[in-house]
């Protein structure tokens, strides 16, 4: 079975194109280092819930949208190896500065997941 890293991040609507450019560059780097898939998805049908929801999880502001992203790897070990290469890749250095990110990284959340069902 594969292994998946998932991310959820609030992005100001005015910064979507800057986010797309950053994500496209990052995705190419992840794929180059061995990721099997790289997806960045913008909210299309995401409502605020009464108890929990994507908007609540990121404390979404009126001028923002939610981005849901995931990267697929062969295994957790493969994920760890790929991510180590990605994090040391100098091409990502300019994207890691919180002052220049097109989103609020403090409200981003992520995690690694072992698939329960794969069809």
Image (cartoon, rainbow, N blue to C red):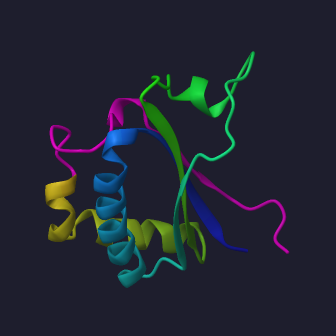
Q: Position of residue 114 (x, y in %)?
A: 69, 59
Q: Position of residue 61 (x, y in %)?
A: 45, 23
Numbered range of the magenta stretch: 96-119
Question: Residue at coordinates 42% horizontally, 29% vertically from top-left?
Answer: 63
Location of residue 47 (image quadrant)? top right
User: Compared with residue 6, is residue 25 higher up or lower down, i.e. above or below?
Assistant: below
User: Compared with residue 45, is residue 74 higher up or lower down, i.e. above or below?
Assistant: below
Quadrant including the C terminus: bottom right
Question: Residue at coordinates 63% horizontally, 66% vertically from top-left?
Answer: 3
User: Compared with residue 52, is residue 100 higher up or lower down, i.e. above or below?
Assistant: below
Q: Position of residue 89 (x, y in %)?
A: 21, 70
Q: Position of residue 104 (x, y in %)?
A: 33, 34
Main SS of residues in magenta: loop
Quadrant including the N terminus: bottom right
Question: Residue at coordinates 48% horizontally, 77% vertically from top-left?
Answer: 35
Along the viewing direction, whichever of 8 and 89 lies nearer the viewer: 8
| Residue 32 inside the magenta-drawn segment | no
């Amino acid at each position: 079975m594969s292994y998946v890293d998932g991310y959820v991040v609030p992005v100001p609507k005015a910064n979507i194109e800057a986010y797309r450019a950053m994500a496209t560059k990052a995705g190419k780097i992840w794929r180059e280092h061995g990721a099997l898939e790289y997806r960045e998805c913008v909210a299309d049908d995401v409502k605020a819930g009464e108890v929990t929801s994507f908007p609540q999880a990121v404390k979404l502001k009126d001028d923002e949208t939610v981005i849901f992203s995931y990267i697929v790897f062969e295994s957790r070990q493969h994920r760890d190896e790929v991510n180590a290469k990605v994090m040391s890749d100098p091409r990502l250095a300019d994207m890691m500065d919180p002052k220049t990110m097109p989103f609020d990284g403090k409200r981003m959340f992520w995690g690694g997941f072992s698939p329960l069902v794969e069809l």
